[in-house]
Amino acid sequence: MTNVHTNNAGTADVIATPPPGQKRKGRGKTTGLSIQKKLKESVNGKLKVIIPPDRMVAVGPGAKDFVTELSVTVLHNARHDVKNWKGVSDLAKDRIVAHMLDTFQLPDIQHNRDTILQTAKNLYRYRRSRLHDHFKKFATKEVRLQNMPSQVSEAEWKFLVEYFNSDDFKKMSERNKSNKAKQEVNHICGRKSFQAVSFEARDTNTGKEPNSQKFWEMTHVNSNGHWVNDASAEVNDKVKEVVAEKIQEIEEGTDVDLIANAAFMQTMREKAGYACGQGSGVKPVTRRSRDEIQEQLEAQQKEIEEERRKRESLESKLMEVKNQLEEERRSREVMETRLVREQKLLKEGVMALVSHMQSSMNGLPAAIFNIINNSAGSDEASPTSLMDKN
């Protein structure tokens, strides 16, 4: 038994009613009621969210609300009686984009539109995967049709039962299962996007996000300090080796983050449309981007080298001034020593003269004798001063 509710978008939301006495399992469908409450409390009727220009994913405090609202919007507009997201009508996709632009404070630019659709595609594929999990719980077509999941219409479920049972889908499913089994590296982020994790880990003062090597550790090391598996640890070890080699080739003071990012790109392979180790939402680094990073490193090294030359030139000039001041100090000390010696000799000469005059001039008036004696006792005594006073 099912209850059918037609929403404003013209699509049917179908909720399966469990048999009497049996409780429904699971968390139920996302309704977005909390979003509606936040919209009423917002200043301009819209919610804040950040979509950086260099990545196709929402980040920051509003990212969770963005994904929740988009999930509900995809549920109400993107039907599942098609093979994949590509089969969803352009009208439905336009409605999804328009609603998100009306709900969040986002400029209506192509990058934001593409990000909304890319995220909607991921949510659609995730919901399709959960529908396939429900399909696999039952053994026969008849039983599967009788156990229609919530949030899809009867027509959609009939299509999906036929599609999931087709040879084309089974081949694709086996191929995807095989590719997933080949994945050697796991992470600890769950369903949270790598880019959201990176954004939240940015430096609060500079706004700078962790470099690729540091980010790899953040997303592949458990809370107990152990790597999720040996493959993750091996990647980290390889990146460290490359970083150590590059550090020996550069000038001291070069930005280590640039070196770590370049080393990570050199170590990790990149799939088409996907930057390994950085999650979805980040475009893979092209050869041109690698060259740009290398140019940045070289430019930074040149800048550091120029600063080093300027510093050495300044230090050389400072040393010259220091040596000059030292030479002047030594010259001043020599002059002071010479002056003291000359004053001492002069004083001794004056005292000898006074003694001679005292012995040979018995009739010398006492007043004149005192003047000569006082002059001889002064540090500034000189023949000239004696003559002036006499």
Image (spheres, grey):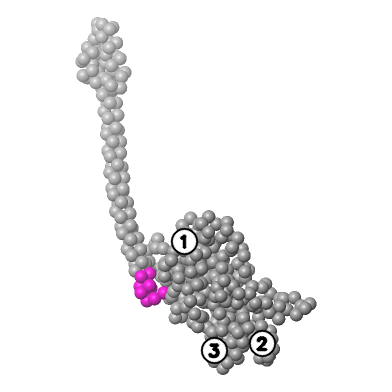
| Region in magenta | 285-294
For mark 2, give the secondary structure: helix
Residue 168 percent coordinates (x, y): 54, 92
- Foreground mark, 2 or 3, reads 2
Disc 2 and disc 1 in contact, CB within 8 angstroms: no
Is residue 293 in the magenta section?
A: yes
Q: Nearer the viewer, residue 364 or 315?
A: 315
Task: Say which amino acid is labelled 1.
Answer: Lys
* Residue 77, quarter of picture: bottom right
Q: Say which mark, if any, is on residue 196.
A: none
CA separation, marks 2 and 1? 52 Å
Q: Residue at x 41, y 63 (%)?
A: 255
> Which residue, given by chain and number where applicable, does mark 2 sit on?
145
Task: Say which amino acid is labelled 2.
Answer: Leu
Could you classify mark 3 by the number of other residues whose Cα lies within 10 Å: few (under 14), some (14-19), or many (20 or more)? few
Q: Earlier in the sequence, mark 2 or mark 1?
A: 2
Main secondary-structure element of the magenta-colored stretch? helix
> Which residue, given by chain and number where applicable, does mark 1 sit on?
208
Q: Vertically, is 382 above or below 53?
A: above
Q: Earlier in the sequence, mark 2 or mark 3?
A: 2
* Numbered circles on residues, count: 3
> Which residue, given by chain and number where applicable, does mark 3 sit on?
172
Residue 70 percent coordinates (x, y): 54, 70
Q: Vertically, is 20 above or below 243?
A: below
Residue 209 percent coordinates (x, y): 48, 63
Q: Residue at x 66, y 83 (%)?
A: 148
